[in-house]
Amino acid sequence: MALRTPVRTERPAPAKNVGGRGRRPRPSAAGARIWTWLTLPGTVWMSVFFIASLLLVAAISFGTTDQLGDPRFGTDLGNLKALADPAYRDVMVRSLGYALLTSVICLLIAYPVAYAVALHAGRFKNALIAAIVVPFFANYLVRMYGWSVLLSDDGPVLQLLRAVGLADDHTKILNTGFGVIAGLVYGFVVFMIIPLYAAMERMDTALIEAGRDLYGGPLRTFLFVTVPATRQGAAAGMVLVFLPAMGDFVSAQFMGGPNQIMIGNLIQDKFFEGQDWPLGSALTMALMAVLLLAMFGYLRRTRKDEAEATR
């Protein structure tokens, strides 16, 4: 009986990466120069119209005013010391509270809206997003004026509440803190809906199915699966709402009274009516400091989340 010689089969060697295929091409020096030139106009624009103006405001905050009310540069610290005045401090604290409360209310409103549109709207999601966004293309002042008409003492909102017995003739919405917050929520809620919608669009729906098997009820699934998976969108929305709400003055002017003025109204008054540009500049710098702290907190949280995701 003849013995068969076993045939050895060798695996083919993996194909070499010819021409660098599969690798991310490195930008050439010419391409890098092109991108540098493309970013130059935006850099110049920001430097001239933002950074330079911010430095000018900072310089004026150390100045004084002459007899005609015109600003004069100087090294006076009186404007910065005036920020410790209880009247200004109360306005700053009120503005901070209004902005934080507005951000929380917008978050509570935007989460179910974004969840329904992103996961349950099907082929109508684009139309629904357009229906949410397009009304905000109207001028902000026009929208706030219309909102003040709706919430006025003789407006349809209070008339409806009185008809169903939820309000009486003494109930007011305008000239109250509730009215100011209602205006802020109406003005900036879209800035919360869009980031949450984008985060839920990127979320893997298999996580929700697994969460239902693990946690059972839809509420627990939403709290322990959907909310953690979309926290970056929620954080972005909180920043996008908090920053403009903190410096807003239109809502307080249309919806509030003398006891509801915000830091934006105070700055507007110092620049245009009070003719006290140095004090208005000092208030502006204090507002910018609060906004920068909020922005740095958001960026730090974002970097932390990215570091945890890459582990």
Image (tube, rainbow, N blue to C red):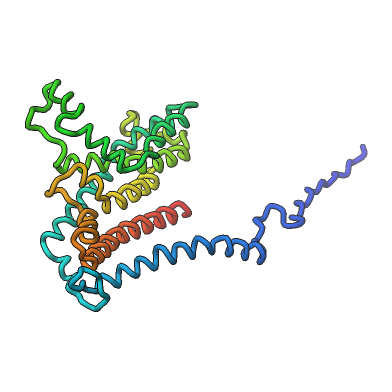
Residue 210 makes an appearance in the image: no
The residue at the point 37 percent across, 48 percent down is: 236
Which of the pair 104/223 is nearer the observer?
104
Q: Position of residue 269 (x, y in %)?
A: 20, 57
> Dividing the image into 4 quarters, which one contains the N terminus?
top right
The residue at the point 38 percent across, 57 percent down is: 299
Left or right of 140? Residue 181 is left
Residue 67 makes an appearance in the image: yes
Q: Residue furthest top?
A: 164
Q: Position of residue 131 (x, y in %)?
A: 41, 31
Which of the pair 138/111 is nearer the observer?
138
Left or right of 224? Residue 45 is right
**Rendering quarter of residue 104:** top left
Q: Residue furthest front?
A: 68
Q: Position of residue 227 (x, y in %)?
A: 35, 40
The residue at the point 33 percent across, 43 percent down is: 140
Q: Position of residue 242 (x, y in %)?
A: 29, 50
The residue at the point 66 percent across, 66 percent down is: 29
